[in-house]
Image (cartoon, grey):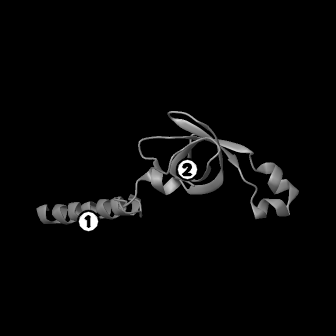
Amino acid sequence: MKKETRIVLNVVAILVLVAAVQILPAKPFHSTAAPEQEATQTQSVSGKIATVGKTSFTLTLEATPSSRQGQQLQEAMPKSMTFQIDKNTTIDGKMKVGANADVTYREDSGKYIAINVRVS
């Protein structure tokens, strides 16, 4: 009787382990990138600097050739954008009103966070 009980308990334990393995997610447990980095995408715009503050600046956008092709695209594109500057923002050149700038940015909670600013 003890031998039969052990066999039944072993079979039940194996079935529980198999069921547990089936429930586990198929994704790897460790990701090489942070979840925020996977979700955010960077974009770029060019234009003239309209205002400069300590933690932000406003860029008046240039019309791009693709936006000139369709009236709807041109109307959908904003005329200016305000970017937040944080500790990770790199700025190449001196930011001053009227200077041309190329900005690489990401959107976070409806705000535009400048990643790289190249002033020419």
Q: Is residue 111 above or below residue 18?
A: above
Q: Residue at x 52, y 54 (%)?
A: 39
Q: Residue at x 53, y 47 (%)?
A: 114
Residue type (three-letter) at the residue carrying disc 2: Arg
Q: Position of residue 33 (x, y in %)?
A: 40, 58
Quick one: label 2 or label 1, which is nearer the N terminus?
Answer: 1
Decide which of 26, 54 is in the foreground and name it: 54
62 relative to 49 in the view: left or right: right
Tell me the crowding category of disc 2: few under 14, some 14 to 19, or many 20 or more residues within 10 angstroms, Cα based.
some
Decide which of 65, 36 is in the foreground and name it: 65
Q: Is residue 26 above or below residue 73?
A: below
Q: Residue 27: which quarter of the image?
A: bottom left
Q: Is residue 98 above or below residue 19?
A: above
Q: Say if residue 110 shows up in the picture.
A: no
**Distance between the alpha carbons at the discs numbered 2 and 1:** 54 Å
Residue type (three-letter) at the residue carrying disc 1: Val
User: Which element carries disc 1, helix, strand or loop?
Assistant: helix
Q: Which residue is mark 1?
A: 11
18 relative to 5 in the view: left or right: right
Residue 106, labelled with which disc? 2
Q: Residue at x 85, y 60 (%)?
A: 70
